Amino acid sequence: MARMNMNARPVMPLVAAVQLVCIAPAALFLTSVLVGAGDNPPRFGLAIQSRRLVAWFATHGTVAPLLILLPLAALAVGGATLLQMRRPATFATLVVAWATGTSACILAIVVRHALAN
């Protein structure tokens, strides 16, 4: 029977937090694109604010890092963490799995859009 190291800290909650921080800007941007894509010109405050946010991202040159690099990092870290996991699933493990899947979906949307243009 293997001895458990009592000084080992659980890594899964930290990985889950890092992943959520990595995918939050991309999720916010893609949600803003979806909300602002409605009426032309936008009539409601949420659509106007969404378009302003998208314009801000576009003018500051932060779209590529937010839509490609951060979700890619979240996908790599989450995938590596899930492959090395040997313990039963906890809530943090489920969050890591969800964030890994979400980052893969974000990357698929971005790549599809880039190839279409």
Image: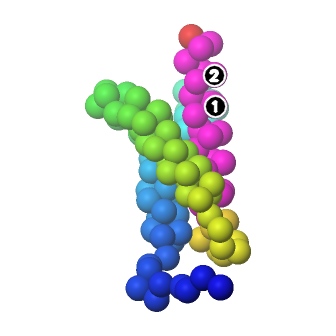
20 left or right of 92?
Answer: left
Q: Please name whichever residue, 88 or 39, is drawn nearer the observer in this view of the structure.
A: 88
Q: Where's residue 106, x and y in %?
A: 59, 38
Instruction: Sort mark 1 into few (<14), some (14-19) or many (20+) by Cα contacts within 10 Å.
Output: few
Q: Residue at x 47, y 33 (%)?
A: 68
- Taking the magenta stretch, the answer to whether it contains residue 40 is no
Residue 28 appears in view: no
Magenta stretch mostly in which secondary structure? helix
Residue farthest to the right, as pictured: 88
Residue farthest to the left, as pictured: 60
Q: Which quarter shows the C terminus?
A: top right
- Residue type beneath disc 1: Ala
Q: Residue at x 44, y 80 (%)?
A: 8
Q: Where's residue 69, x and y in %?
A: 42, 36
For residue 108, the mark is 1
**Magenta segment:** 95-116
Residue farthest to the front, as pictured: 1
- The quadrant in which residue 112 appears is top right
Instruction: Sort mark 2 into few (<14), some (14-19) or many (20+) by Cα contacts within 10 Å.
Output: few
Pointer 1 with pointer 2, Cβ within 8 A: yes
Q: Please name whichever residue, 6 or 107, is drawn nearer the observer in this view of the structure.
A: 6
Instruction: Please give the count of numbered marks on the rendered protein.
Output: 2
Identify the residue position indicated by label 2 in the image. Answer: 112
- Residue type beneath disc 2: Arg
Element under disc 2: helix
Q: Where's residue 6, x and y in %?
A: 46, 88
- Taking the magenta stretch, the answer to whether it contains residue 105 is yes
The correct choice, above or below, for 88 with respect to 97 in the image is below
The correct choice, above or below, for 61 with respect to 80 in the image is above
